[in-house]
Image (cartoon, rainbow, N blue to C red):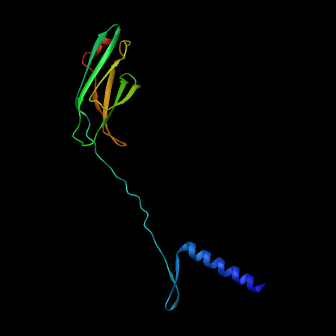
Amino acid sequence: MIRSIRFRGVLTLAAVLASISTFGIGTSGAQFSATTTNASNHAASITIDSPANLTASLSFVLLDCRADLDWDPGATVGVTQYEVKRIRISNGAVLNTVVTSSTDFSETIGVTLLGQPWRWEVRSILGAWKSAPATIEPSNGLLCLL
């Protein structure tokens, strides 16, 4: 019984030492060496150019308002998609979000109550990264107001 207690004690001590650090046998007998690992995280950042020369025009077609947006890609290489958002100016509500691979976008938006015009934001997308928005409020926005 004493042997089994000593054997369990040795196994327990060996398990504790193994979980804390490495344990090895050197030429001079038992040798204890601590192992330290630096597990610091590194954050990466990337800058993506916003679309350039964003233009928007509104036209009244068959009792609806049509918005046509056009832009040039930014200088960032590899951008293949753009996020387009229509936002109500009065309260900042996002009314529509579309991802497109084209550098132009059109949508039928209906008419709105006076004082409720829109603005559009277009962002370049590269993988999981997005640029700052290019923003525009059409200069002929009164065309679509009741």
Q: Residue furthest bottom?
A: 28
The reply, left or right, for residue 136 in relation to residue 36 is left
76 up-or-down from 111: above or below: below
Quarter of the rendering containing residue 59: top left
The reply, left or right, for residue 38 in relation to residue 120 is right
Identify the image quadrant of the N terminus: bottom right
What residue appears at the point 36 percent right and 25 percent down from the top-left corner? 86
119 up-or-down from 77: above or below: above
Count of numbered circles in the view: 0
Point out residue 129 in the picture as x, y percentages from the top left corner: 35, 42
**In front here: 98 or 91?**
98
What residue appears at the point 21 percent right and 40 percent down from the top-left corner? 75
66 up-or-down from 18: above or below: above
Point out residue 118 in the picture as x, y percentages from the top left corner: 34, 21
The reply, left or right, for residue 52 in relation to residue 35 is left
Identify the image quadrant of the C terminus: top left
Quarter of the rendering containing residue 70: top left
Point out residue 143 in the picture as x, y percentages from the top left corner: 29, 11
51 up-or-down from 113: above or below: below
The reply, left or right, for residue 36 in relation to residue 68 is right
Q: Is residue 145 visible?
A: no
Q: Is residue 129 visible?
A: yes
Point out residue 44 in the picture as x, y percentages from the top left corner: 34, 52
What residue appears at the point 35 percent right and 15 percent down from the top-left corner? 115
